[in-house]
Every structure is written in structure tokens, then in C-alpha cells.
Image: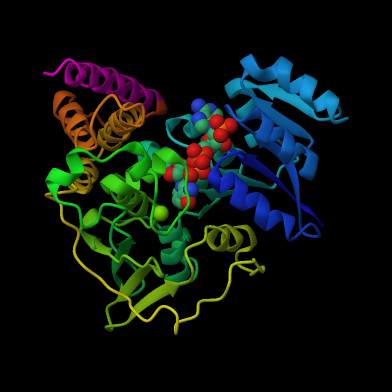
Amino acid sequence: MLQTVCILGATGSIGESTLKVLAEHPDQYSVFAVTANSRIEKLIEICKQFNPKIAVVPSVHVDRFAQLLKQHQLQHIEILADEAGLLAVAAHPDVDIVMAAIVGAAGLLPTLAAVKAGKRILLANKEALVMSGEIMLQAAKQHNALLLPVDSEHNAIFQCLPQNYLQLETNNQPQLGVSKILLTASGGPFLNFSLDQLQTVTPAQACKHPNWSMGRKISVDSATLMNKGLELIEACHLFSISEHFVTVVVHPQSIIHSMVQYVDGSTLAQMGNPDMCTPIAHALAWPKRISTSVPALDLFLNQQLNFQEPDIQRFPALALARQAMRIGGTSPAILNAANEIAVAAFLEEKISFTAIPEVVEFTINKITPNNAESLDVILHADHLARDVARQRVEQLIGGQ
Ligand code: NDP
Ligand code: MG
């Protein structure tokens, strides 16, 4: 039986890797729905190749998209629009698997819709989990959804954990002999830059990651180490452990994608060439395995595996994220929202690279976090944090 896949964020970097894996297994998977935000021409190319049943675009693009579909004799593809369209395809009764690969907070409600519809969810959109944490995990339990990590580190940890670890009751302690999670970080393109050098780096430099090819937002997050901070929070939620059981290890080669330590002295690592097709294929087929075009690791070509501690003086975003996780409640949502605003301002060349953690810290210090007891409370914190972060960005632009 073919399994049907809905790709939220099909035009992005993860979307592209997902389609690449699916194209290699047409006998097992079919693309049911795809979504885009701005790259409409790219979505047409995807529709030509995969012929989905439904495509979702923002309403401002619907007319042009419909015209383009007609031009390519694809008018049988149903068009849905905006958030309502995203929610509809994420929870569609004919969908088996949802790839959650929209970037940022925009992915939260569609991902939750898939969770509440009890789907197998391939979770790339870490911001959604960082924001909603317990609420998303509880909903997954309640609705029998399978939340599988696609983020390469979390997928690696999942592979190194005992079977069924994700199904355990949550208690914030490592269980089944696990003692620690070692979350690896490449260190990003500025690993060896001084604080002075960091002041003047450009968006183009920040988006040129040494090992991974990714969307612009996550590339900047990798460069500030906020990505690792978000991943620390993601790991605490996914694997139900307190933040002090997660150690961040800088490993510039990105060959080991993370590790799990056990009480008997064992350390298990998952290794592979840095290509998102591997974790995507793993999450798609789990507990089975399917092939990808990623070449097997040649250890004779990669003779060096280096490790070092992260430097939180030069990369304070990591410490801010750890602090947000420790505080809990709406703190991670506030951190995430402020970061999204700051990264967008940096990408638009309005603020410097080093101003990104500054805006985040300012916002966290300005807002008192609440218990994240409902989605409304979380979304309210998100909106408030965006307002505060925007004000701080304006002040910085004005030289204050
Ligand atoms: P991209 O920027 O390449 O893609 C983002 C996708 O989301 C695009 O399809 C984009 O549409 C869509 N999108 C953006 N804004 C909105 C919106 N407001 N409403 C609906 N759709 C929207 O990002 P990545 O693929 O790199 O990352 C996606 C997610 O996966 C992120 O959360 C990231 O942290 C995570 N991730 C990515 C990894 C990677 O290697 N790239 C690794 C691990 C996690 P369009 O392009 O049409 O504008
Ligand atoms: Mg990652």
C-alpha cells in the first residue's frame, strides 16, 4: 500500500530533501499535498514532477498559481489558501505522513493540527516544539500521533536511545540506563572568529554554512549557536529530560550527529555524511530502513574527529536558550519569537550579527514568563515578544 505524504514547506531546503527521498521510492510513498509561501514557480515545478492532489499557497498568489497550473495542464490539482489550507492538508483524512518543514512559528498551528489528527509527523520545524513543548507532546499522546525527529541531532539521539524510549512516561530524568545526551554542534561558519570579527559579518557570510546547505533563518541560527540553543530545548521536550542532562559538544566535521551516554560507561554515536536525506529517510521508514543516495561514510577520508566546548562569551545565544529552558513556561516561546525578529532584521541588514543575541536578551529581560498552560497563552507571549524585539531593533537602528 502506498503511504501518502503531506509536505508543509515543500519549497524549502528540507522540503527539497524530502522530495528527493520520496522520488527514490515511488512504490512506497505518494505526495498528496504540498505547500509554499513565496516560491510559487518552484511549487509549480514540484507539482509537475509529483502531481499532488492539493497545493496550498497564500491567497495573494492563488490567481497566478491557478493560471500557472492551467498552463501546465495541472488544473486538476486543488488549490487551498492560507493558514486554513495548511491546517486542512495537515489533518486531511487521506494523509498518512506529515513532514513539518515550515520555518519558524508559522509552522506551529499546522504541526499541531497534524498531531491532533494522529498522523506520523516528521518534525523538522523545531520552533513549533520549542514554543509549545508539553502541549504538543501531550497532544501527541492523546491523539496517538507519532512524532519523529528529523533534526539531524535529534534523529541521531533517537537512533542511539533504547527502543520505545519516546513512548516512556515523562519524568525529566534519563531512563533505561541513559545518563546523558551529547548534542553535537558544528560551531557554524564563525567558530574561530573573534568578538571583533563577529561585529561586522554579513548575512551572506552567515548563510554559508561549512557542512550543511539550509534555509537562511536556520543558517543564521547555526552561526549564532541559537540553533543549538533551540535544539537543546527540543531535546529536553522530545526525550523528556532536564537541560542539565544535555551537554553541547562542538564537533566541526559534522560526522557524528549526536551521542547518548549510558550508566555503564558506553557512549553511542550516530555517524554519517552531513545530508538531511538520511534523517528524513529514517523518520519516513522507521522502524524499517529505506535507501538514499547519500554516500556511505568513508572513514579513511574523514580521519579527524575533533571536539571542543562551546564558547558562550562569543556565542551567548546558547546560554540564553539554556536559561529559557530552565525557567520554562512561556520563556522558550519568548526567546524564539525575539530570535525570529532579530534574525529577520539581521538578514535585512538592519542590525549587526552580534545584536541578534542582544535583542533576544533584552526581550527576555523585559517580559515576565507565564505558565505555558494553553496555546493562547503561548501565542500571546509570542506576539508580545515580537513587539518588544521590534522596538529594540528600532532603537538599535536609531543608534540607541
Ligand atoms: P527554508 O527557509 O529553506 O524553507 C522554509 C519553508 O517554509 C519554505 O517552504 C517556505 O515557503 C515555508 N514558509 C516560510 N514562511 C512561511 C509562512 N509564513 N507560512 C507558510 N509557509 C512558510 O527552511 P529549511 O527547509 O531550512 O527549514 C525548515 C525547518 O526545518 C526550520 O524550522 C528549520 O529549523 C528546520 N530544520 C532545517 C534543517 C536544514 O538542514 N535545512 C535541519 C534541521 C531542521 P517559500 O519557500 O515558498 O517561501
Ligand atoms: Mg540540527
Question: Horizontal placement of 130 versus 229: left or right?
Answer: right
Residue 391's spot in the image, x, y percent? 23, 16
Is residue 258 visible to us here?
yes
Q: How is the image coloured?
A: rainbow
Residue 333's spot in the image, x, y percent? 32, 33
Work out whether residue 124 or residue 163 is closer to the camera in this orientation and state it.
124
Vertical comparison of 311 with 69: above or below: below
Which picture quadrant has residue 197? top left
Work out whether residue 378 or residue 348 is closer to the camera in this orientation and state it.
348
Q: Residue at x 62, y 51 (%)?
A: 18
Classify the position of ligand 2 by quadrant: top left, top right, bottom left or bottom right.
bottom left
Vertical comparison of 151 with 230: above or below: below
**Magenta segment range?**
376-400
Work out whether residue 241 or residue 142 is closer to the camera in this orientation and state it.
241
Q: Main secondary structure of the magenta part?
A: helix
Vertical comparison of 270 with 355: above or below: below
Is residue 109 visible to us here?
no
Q: Residue at x 32, y 35 (%)?
A: 336
Q: Magenta span has 210?
A: no
